[in-house]
Image: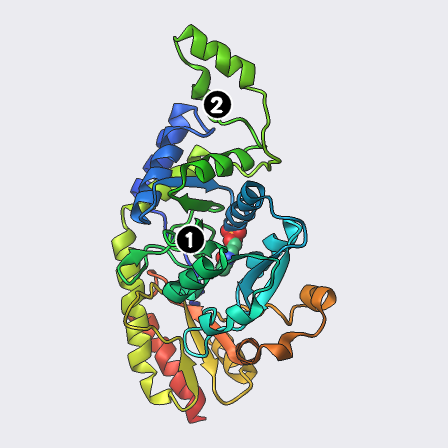
Amino acid sequence: MKEDRYIGVGDLKLTKEDKAMVNKVLDSNRLSYGPVSKEFEHEFAHLHDSKFGIFTNSGTSSLQIALAALKERYGWADGDEVIVPAVTFIATSNIVIHNNMRPVFVDVEETTFNIDPKKIEKAITPRTRAIIPVHLLGLPADMDPIMAIAKKHDLRIIEDSAETMFAKYKGRTVGSFGDIGCFSTYIAHYIVTGVGGINTTSDKELAVMLRSIMNHGRDSIYISIDDDSTNDVNKLKEVIGKRFRFVTLGHSFRVTELEAALGLSQLKRKDHIVARRKEIAARYLKGLSDLKEYLQFQYTPPDRDNVYMLFGIVSKTGKKEDLVNFLEQNGIETRDLLPLLNQPVYIKRFGNIEGKYPVAKRLDESGFYIGCHQYITDDDIEYIVGKFHEFFRS
Ligand SMILES: Cc1ncc(COP(=O)(O)O)c(C=O)c1O
């Protein structure tokens, strides 16, 4: 019999303040890119040690335009290569293919589940142009060696930080290491705006390109409907002349002031969101510490934060199915730990290559995650820990 209790991998409880911010936008009759989006972008970029933020309609869009902007700026050719980890959400490598480039996979670390810097150089060829390290499940990738490799081989870096917000690696925040950082505000993330993604960068030219590409490739002179409200006649003439000018091959990846209002409001409680997630993870780790013979958890090196978007677990006894089914029957939602190379669409495209990535293969077969979000109660934690023990007792 299925439990009444349900602990999902994500949840959402909008507050009075969130709703008031949204209502304020509705009352303003202004939905297109405007003051609320600008404030959200500014705040978000600032919190991620970056000068510019660009709010789009998804984390995938933010990745798509990040690579498009770099490809355009550096004149990369179709078929050039981009290194991505062999364990990640499929969007990380899909966007490489959507940009007519080739993803080259690199295995991940046994302990952190993030891309293994020691294995990157072997994957570099004369056609390699960029690396997309992913900060998986809330844990920053090992950025120092990755940045050193990028410098040595003249490669660009896009950080896929869709699963990690506000976290620091050696005192510096994710999204500020590479040329461009990419975040998601989709359901079950830290800040939830329904749909949404954010680019961070400190490179002004790239910021302008990103803004253009997400907006049909428009000339940066006319990005918001305020850009032609000027009393300066000469300025107005120039704007009118260029208002319908398209300078890059763009997409329609815009969002509205409504999503920005939700984001801006939730940023105010980011400290609580992060602190509670860390606290829940610490309690899971303590409560499950006597099951280490059966279970492996994501290791957090002391030089970085783990802000635990999700709590990753690997079954050490091989098959995870019985455990996962038991948890689900007891109302504890699980998901596979981001298997990529064994997905039908990738097998069709790349063949059966999973065997070349032994760590990824093990995680694909035996890894899963459970929720670690701020709405999980102390009672839920006790219940979850209890269910793991019940499973292994039997
Ligand atoms: C690592 C990673 N990259 C990209 C994305 C895509 O983000 P979105 O769903 O907002 O498009 C996700 C989704 O959570 C993700 O986990």
Mark 2 packing: few (<14 Cα in 10 Å), some, or many (20+)?
some
Where is residue 46? Give x, y as percent: 30, 44
Q: Nearer the viewer, residue 151 or 51?
A: 151
Where 187 falls versus 204 (above or below)? below
Where is residue 129? Give x, y as percent: 56, 55
- Would residue 378 be seen by someone viewing this image from the given angle? yes
The amino acid type of the residue labelled 1 equals: Gly
Q: Nearer the viewer, residue 87 or 158?
A: 158
Q: Quadrant of residue 83?
A: bottom right
The amino acid type of the residue labelled 2 equals: Ile
Read off the residue under disc 1: 178
Residue at (40%, 12%) from the top-left corner? 230
Q: Is residue 197 left or right of residue 346?
A: left
Where is residue 384? Give x, y as percent: 38, 76
Where 390 falls versus 203 (above or below)? below
Q: Quadrant of residue 348?
A: bottom right
Q: How far separated are the C-alphas under marks 2 and 1? A: 27 Å
Where 16 falls versus 149 (above or below)? above
Residue at (49%, 41%) from the top-left corner? 56
